[in-house]
Amino acid sequence: MSVEIHEPEIEALIERRMASGVFEDVEDVLLYALKSAPFPSGPASESDRENQSLREMFESVRGLADDIEFTRNPSMARPVDL
């Protein structure tokens, strides 16, 4: 099977995920996206969520925050009188 990506935004997202080191190749990125996407019939029922292991729950959100920068902005610090 061959897959073509025509949207530059999607290609950039895939490249960022691969650059993070979490995924080895494009197939890993696509597999993760397909596994974590809800089925068109709707979200998982409450009983399905209760039967997930803790590992499965964490795997479903792995990589979602890889592109968030958590550094502090030093210009927002309050003045300190010493």
Image (cartoon, rainbow, N blue to C red):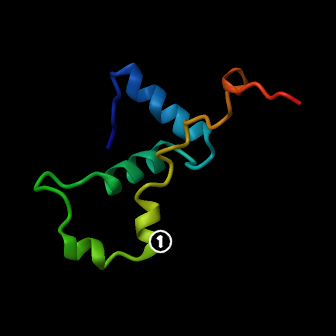
In the image, residue 51 sits, relative to residue 26, either above or below, namely below
- Left or right, residue 25 beside residue 82: left
In the image, residue 71 sits, relative to residue 1, either above or below, namely above
Counting every numbered tag in the picture gives: 1
Q: Residues within 10 Å of mark 1 (few under 14, many from 20)?
A: few
Which sits in the foreground, 23 or 44?
44
Picture coordinates of residue 21 (x, y %)? 63, 45
Q: Quadrant of residue 3?
A: top left
- Left or right, residue 5 beside residue 81: left
Residue type at numbered disc 1: Arg
Q: Residue at x 34, y 22 (%)?
A: 7
- Left or right, residue 43 beside residue 33: left
Which sits in the foreground, 12 or 64?
64
Q: Quadrant of residue 20?
A: top right
The residue lying furthest to the left in this view is 41
Quarter of the picture containing the N terminus is top left
The residue lying furthest to the right in this view is 82
Q: Residue at x 40, y 59 (%)?
A: 60
In the image, residue 34 sits, relative to residue 81, either above or below, namely below
Q: Quadrant of residue 67?
A: top right
In the image, residue 2 sits, relative to residue 5, either above or below, namely below
Residue highlighted by disc 1: 55
Picture coordinates of residue 61 (x, y %)? 43, 55
Picture coordinates of residue 82 (x, y %)? 89, 30
- Left or right, residue 15 beside residue 33: right
Which sits in the foreground, 76 or 82?
82
Picture coordinates of residue 34 (x, y %)? 32, 51
Q: Secondary structure at mark 1?
A: helix
Q: Residue at x 46, y 63 (%)?
A: 58
Q: Residue at x 55, y 42 (%)?
A: 66
